[in-house]
Amino acid sequence: MRINWVALAVFIFVNLLIDWLIDRKLRRVSRVASRIHRLLALALQVMLVVGMAQPFGDAQASDGQMNLAMWLLWTYIACYVPKYLWLLLAWPSFIRRLPRGVKRGFLTAGTVVGLSVFGTLCWGTLVTPGRLQVNEVEVTSPRLGKAFDGYRMVHISDLHLGTYGTDTTIVSRMVDSINGLKPDVIIFTGDLVSRCTSEALPFTGVLSRLKARDGVIAILGNHDYDDYCYWPDSLAKERDHQALCDLQRQMGWRLLCNEHLILTHDGDSVLVIGEENYGEGHFVNYSDLAAAYPDSVRQMPYKILLQHNPKQWREQIVDQTDIDLTLSGHTHAMQMMITLLGKRYSPAGMRYSEWGGLYSKGNQHLYVNIGIGMVGVPMRIGATPEITLIQLRIEN
């Protein structure tokens, strides 16, 4: 990762200014508290530099270095977000004309909000990532064959195995939960890793335990192409990418790379289209819908598209194809989500029209799974890791 040291220096300067303003208030309360705050502020700046200096993009960097960087960055964020909020609310207390009682009220409110936010960030790091949530969804269609009425699909996405280092605890609980649902098929919609194949090695045995009547069907996500590493040459990159694909097949998964397969039971069939990652914005495009969904299989009655990026549904699928159901991941709900009055809100909504849950237009449906693992920072606030049980039903 190439660091813009000028931007980093400006960022640190702004945060030190915030610390200076807070220190002015602390000095009036306790000089000891003021000195401790100064030392912690300097330590946080060092922590930020160390974290940013980690070789994020170096293919030779260890997974331990990446996890160290994630935790250092999380610690920095967890300390400074509450400080910003505290200062925003406590700032009026610096205005001398306000009555003393009013200034104390603002100061108290800032302290309560700051501590609450810090507690929320800690909860989102230490508790939420381990709380797997099973969401049950029913999808209906008049085109579904009788043999698939009640067909149980478990949909998971975005494992980002590097999140867990070598600790298989959460992934093992995920496997047990999925197997306990007794699915007919398990669908994985990409991002097995965050950087490269080495992240997946400690988990192959655990993931091989996934069981379903029609097996595990998988596609690749944007993080599965080794594009987030600097490689010595294109051959090294291709070898690692191929190793990741081979690893999934060795686990017994059916990996579809712009390919399709047909599920058949009692004379009825479902077409599963496995498309590679749909690139938009700064993402590289690997998708080839024409190759994955050729004319020779378009007469199939019910069709399921596996596509990591949900943006393709609105841009190329709905009203433009006869694909019945699309399964996606990718968004993570930006690892932040709140539910109010039965409605879910996430900053992911500013980028994605469809970012989490079931979306429908006519008889065409999209389900976006918000994922299991994490990328960037090891934190999920409200966006509980998701296992989705989708039951197909014939529409009456």
Image (tube, helix red, strand yellow):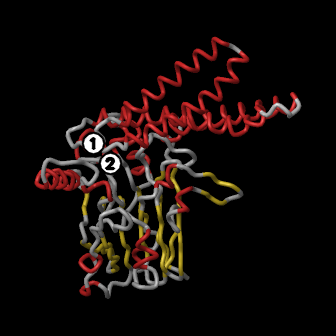
Q: Nearer the viewer, residue 213 or 341?
A: 341
**Answer yes or no: do the residues labelled 1 and 2 have beta carbons within 8 Å?**
yes
Occupied quadrant, residue 121: top right
Element assignment for label 2: loop
Residue 147 location, quadrant: bottom left
Q: Is residue 95 left or right of residue 166?
A: right
Left or right: 81 as drawn, with respect to 42: right
Residue 121 in the figure: left or right of residue 385:
right
Disc number placed over residue 199 in the picture, else none? 1
Residue plotted at (32% across, 58% down): 222
Q: Secondary structure at mark 1?
A: helix
Indicate the amino acid at tag 2.
Ser
Q: Nearer the viewer, residue 200 or 304?
A: 200
Above or below, 180 relative to 366 = above
Mark 2 — residue? Answer: 194
Please state the horizontal and vertical placement of residue 35, each as a whole percent of the image: 59, 15
| Numbered circle sitting on residue 231 | none
Q: Residue furthest top?
A: 32
Question: What is the x, y in percent for residue 8?
Answer: 43, 39
Quadrant into which the C terminus falls: bottom right
Q: Identify the residue at image location x=43%, y=69%.
A: 311
Q: Residues within 10 Å of mark 2 (few under 14, many from 20)?
A: many
How many numbered marks have been drawn onto this rendered protein structure?
2
Percent across and percent down for residue 288 are: 27, 74
Identified at 51% across, 44% down, the residue is: 380
Q: Look at the image and tell me in which quarter the N terminus lies.
A: top left
- Compared to 247, does 294 lie above or below? below
Could you tell me how far apart the alpha carbons at marks 1 and 2 are, in whole angstroms?
Answer: 8 Å
Q: Amino acid at mark 1?
A: Glu
